[in-house]
Image: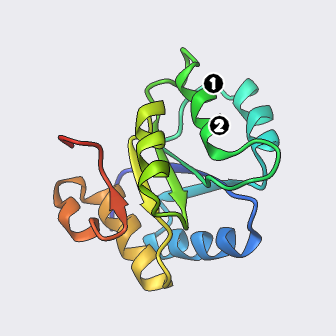
Amino acid sequence: MHERYVQLILVDDDLDDQEIFAEAVRRLGPNVSPTFFLSAREFFKWFDVIECCPEYIFLDINMPVHDGFECLQLIRNSSKFNNCKVVMYSTSSAPSDIRKAFDIGANLFFQKPTSLYDLTNSLRALIFDEENKNSIRRFIQFPDGF
């Protein structure tokens, strides 16, 4: 059992993806607590009132109205949250999306795995075993020199 408490945020307009993410997080144990937003607009409302940064913010890229890149830009322009770990979480593996994410300030680019097993294990390695990032390199892109 992992002793530290971890707060995660997922901003993703796809309910199925949110449910899969929620199940993967549930499998990580009670010390990992997710909060979900269906749109950037919902996230922006929360962002205005929250006082402390969660450990990780996962942002889907392809959302209507405001996309994940806009959310990332808002976070990086905020003095209160500019040090948050932001993970772009997308079905995309386009090099242009990956480069844009890192240029704006993403910490990681996480291509959505196709199985619950892979998602759970990737999240476990990311959250609890940051020294062992090689086990998740097939899903997660790291900035140069990471």
Taking the spot 50% from the left edge, 65% from the top edge, the residue there is 30
Residue 114 percent across, percent down from the top left: 50, 82
Can residue 100 be seen here? The reply is yes
Left-right relation of 16 to 61:
right
Could you classify mark 2 by the number of other residues whose Cα lies within 10 Å: few (under 14), some (14-19), or many (20 or more)?
many
Three-letter amino acid code at the position of disc 2: Cys
Can residue 5 be seen here? The reply is no
Taking the spot 49% from the left edge, 59% from the top edge, the residue there is 32
Label 2 secondary element: helix
Quadrant (top left, top right, bottom left, bottom right) of the C terminus: top left
Residue 11 percent across, percent down from the top left: 67, 52
Q: Is residue 117 above or below residue 37?
A: below
Taking the spot 74% from the left edge, 25% from the top edge, the residue there is 48
Q: Which mark is residue 51?
A: 1
The residue wearing badge 2 is: 71
Q: Is residue 13 above or below residue 42?
A: below
| Closer to viewer: mark 1 or mark 2 | 2
Disc 1 to disc 2, C-alpha distance: 17 Å
